[in-house]
Amino acid sequence: MSSIEDLSARVERLLLRHEELQRAHGLLEQQLLAVSAERDSLRGRLAAARQRIDALLDRLQADAPAAAAPPTGEMP
């Protein structure tokens, strides 16, 4: 009879462990969603920053030839 009681106790422990693992899994899924959302937000911010830098570089390149040319009417 004790083997049935031992088996019953083991099944109870396994059920408790299963519930703990399910809770942990749920928490990990929530963390994954939060981290994924943060990653996506950071990617968007990075893309916007790159666009601003590219625009600034384009402006600098457009202004560079004008700054390098001597003013008209003056001789060096």
Image (spheres, rainbow, N blue to C red):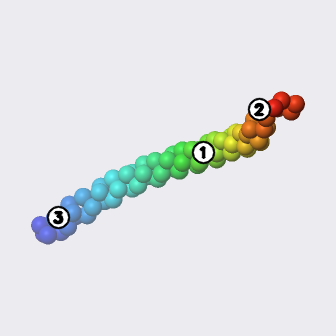
Q: How many marks?
A: 3
| Identity, as a three-letter code, of the amino acid under mark 1 | Leu
| Marks 1 and 3 close (CB-CB < 8 Å) | no
Decide: few, some or many residues near mark 1? Use Cα within 10 Å; few <14, some 14-19, many ≥20.
few
In the rendered structure, find residue 46 and report the number of the disc placed on it: 1
**Mark 3: few/some/many CA within 10 Å (<14, 14-19, 20+):** few
In the rendered structure, the answer to whether residue 74 lies left or right of residue 44 reads: right
Q: Which mark is residue 72?
A: none
Q: Position of residue 10 (x, y in %)?
A: 21, 63
Q: Label 2 amino acid?
A: Pro
Give the label, 1 or 2, closer to the camera. Answer: 2
* Vertical side of 76 occupied by 54: above or below: below
Q: Quadrant of the C terminus?
A: top right
Please provide percent x and percent y for residue 17: 29, 57
Task: Say which label, 2 or 3, has the lower sequence index.
Answer: 3
From the viewer's perspective, tell me whether residue 20 is left or right of residue 57: left
Task: Quickly name the residue at label 2.
Answer: 76
Dot 2: what SS? Answer: loop
Residue annotated with mark 3: 5
Q: Residue at x 57, y 44 (%)?
A: 42
Q: CA distance from mark 1 to mark 3?
A: 61 Å
The mark lying in front, picked from 2 and 3, is 2
**CA–CA distance between discs 2 and 3?**
104 Å
| Quadrant where the N terminus is found in the figure | bottom left
46 or 63: nearer the eye?
63
Alpha carbon separation for disc pair 1 and 2 = 45 Å
Q: Residue at x 37, y 51 (%)?
A: 24
Q: Would you call the spot at circle 2 few (<14 residues within 10 Å), some (14-19), or many (20 or more)?
A: few
